[in-house]
Image (tube, helix red, strand yellow):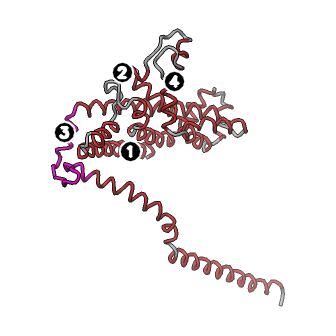
Amino acid sequence: MSLKEAAPPATSAAAAGKARRRGSSSTAGARRRSGKWWIPWLFLAPALILFVYFKFIPMAQAVSMSVQEVRPYLGNTWVGTANYAEILSSEGFRSATWNTILLAIGQTFGSMALGFGLALLVEGQTRKLTFIRSAAFLPVVVPIAVVAELWRIMYHPTSDGLLNQVIGLVGLGPSGFINDPDTSLASIAVTGIWRGAPYDMMIFLAGLAGIDRGLYEAATVDGASTRQRILHVTLPGLRPVFAILFVLAAVRGFRSFTEVFLLTNGGPNGSTEVVMTLIYKLGLEQNRLGVGSAGAVLLFVATLILTVCVQLLRKRRSA
């Protein structure tokens, strides 16, 4: 028998062996998938239990209390939409809502702009930039209580306060900052921007890493300046990142509480009262849990509507 006659059986035998191995591996994979699908859920179970117990159950209870007059130890009574009507007709709630919107807009666009600028400055792979990125990210990991106390010291209203000394170098008079109704909300927004910008910076850095370097090289060859490369290459490449960050920053702004509570507690004269601090005062200080729950539900609905609208707009543009 010649070699040509013997080759086909060997080839067919090898092909049959490969087919058997593929069949056995696919059968084993299907067996693993069908028999041990519960293993990932087993690892997720502790976190899911905590989420259900400490987040979703309280959310359901808040919705339930928003339509009741909550009377501890006496029993709740059904009031329907009376709590919603009361809080919507309240002048304090309307003022707090307006302050929340202004604070959210300022913090959202301020932190995104500063985070984008920082990302452009520290983009790279050298060791020095790694250290700078780590140092710039520190405001995010510092506890908010510490951040609020540091800014309270810097916002000292007298002429020997830290920030007043800085602005005094350019001939500006001392400012009251958080003690002045005209500047208190803007001062809190600056604190929020300082703390939120490094978080946005890290997400922008991840987005910048995904942009094709060849586009920058082609733009450079065509004679594009740095500004033109940012406008026509960087910004279009970061469009999905901007959409995600806008939602995250807006939700963060709408839920501002700790920095406001620690710096001003809604003062002076209600100039920094936001929805979260108003809900806290209604529920825990005035013991009006039903009205406070109604405010919390309204804030949740507003945040949900904002998120859905941004996602729909993003899908429409991508389509």
Residue highlighted by disc 2: 181
For the residues marked 2 and 1, what is the alpha-carbon distance in whole angstroms?
Answer: 31 Å
**Which residue is located at x 33 percent, y 31 percent?**
273
Which residue appears farthest toward the right when viewing the image? 2
Report the side of 12 relative to 266 (left or right). right
Dot 4 and dot 3 residues touching (CB under 8 Å): no
Question: Which is more N-terminal, label 3 or label 4?
Answer: 3
Q: Position of residue 202 (x, y in %)?
A: 57, 40
Dot 2 and dot 4 residues touching (CB under 8 Å): no
Q: Which mark is residue 154?
A: 4
Amino acid type, mark 2? Pro
Q: Which mark is residue 93?
A: none
For the residues marked 2 and 4, what is the alpha-carbon distance in whole angstroms?
Answer: 17 Å
- Figure label count: 4
Q: Nearer the viewer, residue 89 or 273?
A: 273
Amino acid type, mark 1? Thr
Tag in front: 2 or 4: 4
For the residues marked 3 and 2, what is the alpha-carbon distance in whole angstroms?
Answer: 27 Å
Q: Position of residue 228 (x, y in %)?
A: 59, 28
Q: Position of residue 207 (x, y in %)?
A: 57, 42
Amino acid type, mark 3? Glu
Report the side of 136 relative to 264 (left or right). right
Assign a secondary structure to mark 3: helix
For the residues marked 1 and 4, what is the alpha-carbon distance in whole angstroms?
Answer: 35 Å
